[in-house]
Image (tube, grey):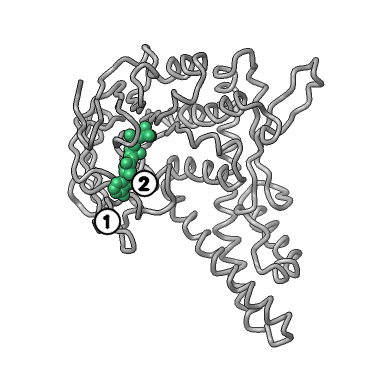
């Protein structure tokens, strides 16, 4: 799949932009703050309806405007579809495919699939567990767009349940009647278990599918490493028992019952996929003891970068194994890497159907990624 045309209206720094694109490599080159990332961010936004840089839509709309539009012609198996999203911060976003409105903008998710490498990727390794859960859930939704709804439901249920726990906990401490809050809590337990077990079972399957690709990618990116060195393991917040959905739901429910007192005391939900962790580990060489150590807190800066790249490359390989080449976006990433990792990454991605690169300095883009070049300056995008 590749984007053959990108049009922006009031998106980030662009009042308007019209950029024809091709399959293969395209690099956007320009000094800092000229709007290179804004272009690739727009394409990434179409794939997930979220940005890799900000958590809300407001910063994506040009300052002083109410609405932004991102439109892209996407070619897949020789057929072109025009995808469009209208961002209306504080109001409902709207999406269209070939000018026909979709019932929900969320229905657009997955029609174009991107894998983004960016300097922020180091937080996958060094950041909080929530960064790694988000990595898993973003990938889940790209592979199974229906899960965007399950994920949103789970977050909504969690917020409602947390506020109920606060109310019921306060009533308990104040010795006032908490009966009605507790009976409502029972209903929210069922909702949480229903959405949570579905999310959990898909995450477990995803980690199992992704793990071999992570090992392979790490061995390619980190010199001298073998494919057994890098591992990912899913660490749930309760003992799962069997992994089939019914057994997961039962174990989840039982744990909620068991932790009821703690949850009321603390006024938050302590069990469920929002408390799980994706553990990243590296094996030490046999002469250094051979045991596995978590990456966070132990790995060197270079090893951490290699792991972050391996997670992105593994995502790309997994999405490809589903039968469709995702669009690769390398946003400002070469400046972060040493010459050797730069060359390795470039070689690995050079054959992808479409690779979009941003860089402040043309020389930072390895020669193997020679392709179409655009200069980005002062809001103008010019082919060079
Ligand atoms: N909502 C917005 N409205 C207007 N301008 C914005 C908005 N969001 C970001 N900008 C501007 O866009 C510019 C940043 O663009 P972008 O992140 O694409 O830069 P870049 O060319 O990738 O730079 P770098 O090489 O530093 O990463 C900044 O000047 C910023 O002020």
Q: Which residue is mark 1?
A: 94
Q: Is residue 131 above or below residue 274?
A: above
From the Cβ of disc 2, is ligand 1 less than 8 Å away? no
Q: Is residue 8 above or below residue 86?
A: above
Percent position of residue 5, x then y: 21, 34
Q: Secondary structure at mark 1?
A: strand
Residue at screen point 72% across, 80% down: 172
Label 1: how many Cα within 10 Å (few below 14, some 14–19, many 20+):
some
Could you tell me how far apart the alpha carbons at marks 2 and 1 are, in whole angstroms?
12 Å
Q: Is residue 98 above or below residue 267?
A: above
Count numbered badges in the picture.
2
Percent position of residue 76, x then y: 28, 31
Label 2: how many Cα within 10 Å (few below 14, some 14–19, many 20+):
many
As drawn, the label of residue 316 is: none
Instruction: Between label 2 and label 1, give the one nearer the viewer.
Output: 1
As drawn, the label of residue 109 is: 2
Percent position of residue 360, x then y: 35, 26
Quick one: quadrant of the C terminus?
top left
Percent position of residue 306, x then y: 57, 24
Q: In the shown orientation, is residue 359 left or right of residue 127?
A: left
Residue at screen point 60% across, 36% down: 125
Residue at screen point 26% across, 47% down: 11
Q: Which label's residue is closer to the chain start, 2 or 1?
A: 1
């Amino acid at each position: 799949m590749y984007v053959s045309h990108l049009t922006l209206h009031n998106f980030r720094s662009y009042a308007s932009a019209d950029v024809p694109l091709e399959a293969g490599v395209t690099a956007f080159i320009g000094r800092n703050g000229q709007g290179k990332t804004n272009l690739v961010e727009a394409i990434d936004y179409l794939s997930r309806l979220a940005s890799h840089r900000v958590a809300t839509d407001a910063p994506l709309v040009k300052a002083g405007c109410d609405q932004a539009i991102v439109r892209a012609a996407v070619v897949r198996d020789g057929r072109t579809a025009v995808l469009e999203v209208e961002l209306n911060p504080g109001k409902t976003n709207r999406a269209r495919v070939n000018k026909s409105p979709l019932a929900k903008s969320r229905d657009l998710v997955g029609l174009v699939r991107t894998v983004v490498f960016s300097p922020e990727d180091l937080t996958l390794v060094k950041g909080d567990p929530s960064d790694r859960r988000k990595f898993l859930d973003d990938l889940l939704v790209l592979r199974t767009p229906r899960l965007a709804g399950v994920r949103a439901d789970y977050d909504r249920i969690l917020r409602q349940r947390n506020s109920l726990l606060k109310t019921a906990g306060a009533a308990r401490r104040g010795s006032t009647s908490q009966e009605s809050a507790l009976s409502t809590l029972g209903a929210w337990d069922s909702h949480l278990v229903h959405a949570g077990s579905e999310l959990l079972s898909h995450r477990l399957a995803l980690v199992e599918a992704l793990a071999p690709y992570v090992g392979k990618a790490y061995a390619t990116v980190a010199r001298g490493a073998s494919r057994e060195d890098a591992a990912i393991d899913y660490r749930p917040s309760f003992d799962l028992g069997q992994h089939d959905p019914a057994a997961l739901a039962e174990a989840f429910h039982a744990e909620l019952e068991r932790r009821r007192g703690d949850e009321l005391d603390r006024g938050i939900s302590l069990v469920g996929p929002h408390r799980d962790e994706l553990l990243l580990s590296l094996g030490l060489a046999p002469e250094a003891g051979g045991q596995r150590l978590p990456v966070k807190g132990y790995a060197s800066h270079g090893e951490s970068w290699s792991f972050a790249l391996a997670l992105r490359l593994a995502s790309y390989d997994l999405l490809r194994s589903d039968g469709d080449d995702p669009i690769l976006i390398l946003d400002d990433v070469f400046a972060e890497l040493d010459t050797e990792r730069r060359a390795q990454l470039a070689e690995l991605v050079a054959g992808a159907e479409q690779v979009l690169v941003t860089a402040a300095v043309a020389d930072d883009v390895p020669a193997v990624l020679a392709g179409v070049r655009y200069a980005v300056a002062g809001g103008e995008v010019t082919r060079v």
